[in-house]
Image: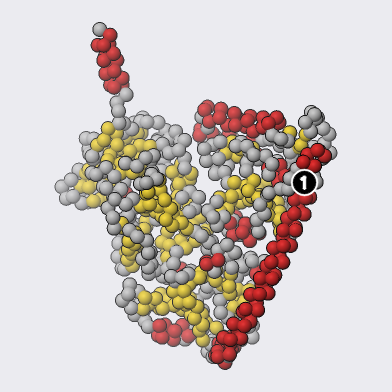
Amino acid sequence: MDGLGMLLNFLLVVAIFPSCYCIDAITIDQSLTDVNVLVSQNGVFALGFFSPGNSKFKYVGIWYHKLPGQTVVWVANRNNPIHDSSGALSISLDGNLVLHNEHDRKVPMWSTNVSMERTESCVAHLLDTGNLVLVQNESKKIVWQSFDYPTDTMLPGLKIGLDWKSGLYRFLTSWRSVHDPGTGDWSYKLNPNGSPQFILYKGLTKIWRSSPWPWDPAPTPGYLPTSANNQDEIYYTFILDEEFILSRIVLKNSGLIQRLTWDNSSSQWRVSRSEPKYIYGHCGANSMLNSNNLDSLECICLPGYEPKSLKNWYLRDGSAGCVRKRQQTTSICRNGEGFIKVEQVKLPDTSIAVLLNKSLSSTECEQLCLGNCSCKAFASLDIERKGYGCLTWYGELMDTVEYTEGHDMYVRVDAAELGFLKRNGMVVIPLLSAALNMLLIILFVKFWLRKMRKQKVKKKWTKRLLSTLVADDLVESRQPSDTPFFDLYIISAATHNFSPANKLGQGGFGSVYMGRLLDGREIAVKRLSQTSGQGMEEFKNEVLLLTRLQHRNLVKLLGCCIEGEEQMLIYEYLPNKSLDYFIFDHSRISVLDWRKCFDIIVGIARGILYLHHDSRLRIIHRDLKPSNILLDADMKPKISDFGMARIFKEDEFQVKTNRVVGT
């Protein structure tokens, strides 16, 4: 009797909670719900409902079926989530694939929205390529496919670009965060103007661009890129020459565009390529970035040009770019001018360039450019190995980069510049060689002296920091600080020259910027304003404390930057902003369920306990508020902003202050 009772209870549980099962198609009679998944023929991909990260919302998406975890490659209702498990994806009477909330079937949450010429029943299949297709039953015609509407991922066979006939514009857009697949700030698009190129945008701001078309095949084993540029379409795609390799291109919510390959031995994705390594227009107009020396981001004026701002140029800030030499006194229009060859570069931004007849030779291209006084430069391109195309520029030459696999470009220079090279061509080489050697020696000595001077300044600065503590016994026992110091040009490059697009917020101290170092680390930069109410004492206080306090619920200080009047603190970047971002917004507060709120409270309490009792210094924060509680990717709290903090001696319980502080 007991055994029969247990069996009945088991059957009852199964009936109430059905297990997830697989289907091979979505038809007029068979829907996709929260308890089943649509699996491709060989089990490579699956389509179903999922909740990303710590989100409570439901989305319909495609992911790798056999891999551990859930690597999502496409999302249907990315901007319109379902709030519970009542969603259903089905075929409507007009043949479209429609997502409904069962509580309200009148208004679809998402639809393929295809107008069909003939009324015919349709069926949805998921292919082993990861492409979800809607097919008419009788004609077998594909009337809609997910590859035409990518989200943040490019799979093998998916075309990024423009279909001139259908008007389809396929491009990638990032997720908002790992918890929200909604349309983010970053997009990766093909720009068809001039000679086509791919551009990475943050909002409407250009952040990085690829080399212009024709795109040469990348020398990556197993990875075969293909492209086309004709009257019907222009696109870029790739295929894999081995069936069992898994590879994809992803636009991260951090703004990185990465090529990833699955490593079976470690069961994780390996990054085989990542961009950007440098920022669009870092060196300004009419100059060139030396990409082979990214640690210093050296800028070089193009032939016939000189720095627009010598002061900034010598401070390694090339954002002002270069201007033409002798532009007020010497004409470059039918006045003996010519061209200087610049070898192996990523050609300047071609969106404002003109691609002339693809059959023109290099000599014909030069004559065309020379005959137009507005033509600044030209390049002769090998078009699909079938002939040469002529590319000409008539405006500023933006974003030129030294590139070992690049093209040659010819820059227009005036007669004086051209005549100097021709007249001294046989003499210039040995003279330049000797002068260059001498220059290198001088630069080396100057660099060495500068480095030694910097070390002395850093030691002096550290000593000044230590002297701010009032506890004599602590001062006597303290060791020299190991705080890393960053050069200004490194922080400037990481934040796109403190671009407004990178600005995270602003307070009484100044502004905070998001940045990315050349090694890929994401940082938050607090830049002290010259008019800030927060002075040097608060700045030193924060550096001194955070270099000696280490706890998982305290923000981590990576270093600081002090050059001239610039004073900056560099922290770890925490993607979920601060606590006030959520608790004071009615739409965002739903993300914080009771469990998360409890964990945040406990984390803050642990941080305060550490400051008051467990650290080697007794610290009173004095400015604890929601905006100073930062949240990491897992919504773990970290206490920040120690500018107002006060150090107490072990036997002290109250002290006097000279001013009103705190919140």
- For residue 127, side relative to residue 356 (left or right): left
- For residue 138, side relative to residue 89 (left or right): left
Q: Choose between 138 and 649: the one closer to the eye.
A: 649
Q: Residue furthest top?
A: 1
Residue 299, x across and y down, in percent = 58, 69
- For residue 610, side relative to residue 164 (left or right): right
Q: Quadrant of the N terminus?
A: top left
Q: Say above or below: 136 vs 594.
A: below
- Does residue 565 appear in this view? no
Secondary structure found at label 1: helix
Q: Choose between 524 and 510: the one closer to the eye.
A: 524
Q: Residue furthest bottom?
A: 423
- For residue 201, side relative to residue 358 (left or right): right
- Does residue 277 appear in this view? yes
Mark 1 residue type = Leu
Residue 567, x across and y down, in percent = 71, 54
Q: Number of callouts in the render?
A: 1
Please tell me how crowded label 1 is: few (under 14), some (14-19), or many (20+) other residues with Cα within 10 Å: some
Q: Quadrant of the C terminus?
A: top right
| Residue drawn 32% across the image and 54% down it | 156
State the scheme by which the image is colored. secondary structure
| Residue drawn 29% across the image and 22% down it | 14
Residue 603, x across and y down, in percent = 60, 31
Residue 221, x across and y down, in percent = 35, 60
| Residue drawn 38% across the image and 67% down it | 215
Q: Choose between 449 and 520: the one closer to the eye.
A: 449
| Residue drawn 44% across the image and 44% down it | 182
Identify the image quadrant of residue 637.
top right
Residue that mark 1 sits on: 466
